[in-house]
Amino acid sequence: MLYGRFIWWLLLGILGISNLIIAKKPNAKELFDKVAPFQGWFGVVSALWGAWGLVDGLLSIKVLSIFPLVWIAWMAGSGVCLALGALMGVGVMKSFVKDAAAADKLTRTVSKLAPFQAIFGFVLIGAAVFLIVA
């Protein structure tokens, strides 16, 4: 189950850097277009899984004293998974929010995160690869 999380992170990271991939390999656009209809739900699940990863990491704080780099990568990856998931799933998340003020706050938060999408993607890929190898 633990490796499943890291494989999910790899996929989310690749989606996060999809614009850079398409810029280098334009024929990759077809592949990302096939995934696009599911990107919102993928983002929502990722945001929830990232939030749970942060809670799980805090509950497992003892790992910090045994494997500090693993714990730091776990927490960083979970936080970035939450942020990147929110970026990708904002449209679906807004459909669940009935309060206009909350939807506006969600939009403002995501607009602040948007410039960092590619960085989040690379960090998430790096954390996943590190944790798979470690």
Image: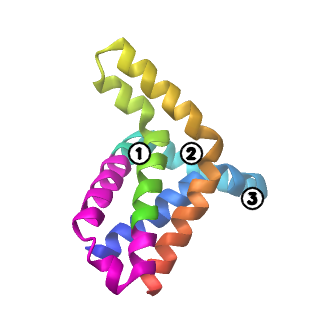
Query: Which quarter of the figure is the N terminus placed in?
Result: bottom left
Asked if residue 22 lies in the magenta stretch, the reply is no
Q: Which mark is residue 33?
A: 2
User: Magenta part of the protein: which range?
Assistant: 45-74
Q: Residue furthest front?
A: 65
Q: Quadrant of residue 59?
A: bottom left
Tell me which numbered mark, 3 or 2, is placed earlier along the sequence: 3
Query: Percent x, y for residue 45?
Result: 32, 48
Q: Which residue is mark 3?
A: 25
Secondary structure at badge 3 equals loop
Q: Which residue is mark 1?
A: 43
Tell me which numbered mark, 1 or 3, is placed earlier along the sequence: 3
The residue sitting at 51% across, 34% down in the picture is 110
Q: Residue furthest left?
A: 59
Say left or right for 116 vs 67. right
Q: Quadrant of residue 14?
A: bottom right
Tell me which numbered mark, 2 or 1, is placed earlier along the sequence: 2
Q: Quadrant of residue 3?
A: bottom left
Question: Looking at numbered disc 1 in the image, what kind of residue is underneath it?
Answer: Gly
* Callout 2 crowding tier (Cα within 10 Å): few <14, some 14–19, many ≥20: few
Between the residue at mark 3 and the residue at mark 2, the CA separation in whole angstroms equals 14 Å
Asked if residue 71 lies in the magenta stretch, the reply is yes
Q: State yes or no: discs 3 and 2 in contact (Cβ < 8 Å).
A: no
